[in-house]
């Protein structure tokens, strides 16, 4: 009962948020692609954590997981023209570097504990 109520509230919240917005085919495609990639990621991650990579430490899994995501991000940035607009004075300023470090630490922590929880659930 509680799960159905929570999911119902989630759906109602999504409708309230999107009320009056225009719907585009590109947005629907992006949402479906995102769901497919998220489900694929979890299924592959579960398999790797329980079979092929069960003896790897969580730190190694975090490193591999984040390193594999680095290259597609650079490729998308290059294809979108973001790398041509690179301004080193903005990116290498002290506030930007602090923001990158805090973001990286938060992401690494989420990844580390997420992998730990996934291992415990899959065990």
Image (spheres, helix red, strand yellow):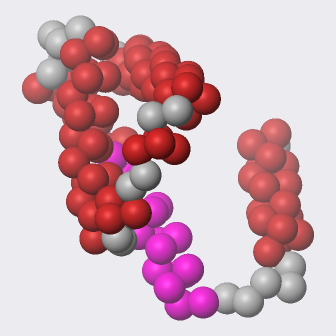
Q: Magenta span has 34?
A: yes
Q: Is residue 106 visible?
A: no
In terms of depth relative to the viewer, which is nearer, 22 or 82? Answer: 82
x 54%, y 81%: residue = 28
* Residues drawn in magenta: 24-41
Residue 89: image x %, image y %? 47, 42
The reply, left or right, for residue 5 in relation to residue 71 is right
Residue 79, image quadrant? bottom left
In terms of depth relative to the viewer, which is nearer, 42 or 3? Answer: 42
x 15%, y 10%: residue = 55
Residue 17: image x %, image y %? 83, 68
Main SS class of the magenta portion in the image:
helix
Q: Residue furthest front?
A: 89
In terms of depth relative to the viewer, which is nearer, 30 or 70? Answer: 70
x 27%, y 64%: residue = 78
Above/below status of 108 relative to 3: above
x 56%, y 80%: residue = 27
Q: Is residue 95 visible?
A: yes
Q: Magenta span has 117?
A: no
The reply, left or right, for residue 64 in relation to residue 42 is left
Above/below status of 26 relative to 8: below
């Amino acid at each position: 009962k509680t799960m159905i109520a929570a999911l119902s509230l989630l759906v109602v919240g999504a409708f309230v948020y999107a009320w009056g917005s225009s719907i585009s085919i590109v947005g629907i495609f992006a949402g479906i692609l995102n769901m497919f990639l998220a489900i694929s990621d979890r299924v592959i991650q579960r398999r790797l954590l329980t079979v092929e990579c069960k003896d790897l430490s969580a730190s190694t899994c975090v490193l591999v997981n984040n390193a594999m995501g680095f290259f597609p991000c650079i490729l998308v940035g290059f294809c979108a023209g973001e790398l041509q607009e690179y301004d080193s004075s903005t990116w290498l300023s002290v506030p930007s570097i602090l923001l990158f470090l805090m973001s990286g630490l938060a992401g690494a922590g989420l990844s580390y504990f997420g992998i730990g929880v996934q291992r415990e659930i899959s065990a």
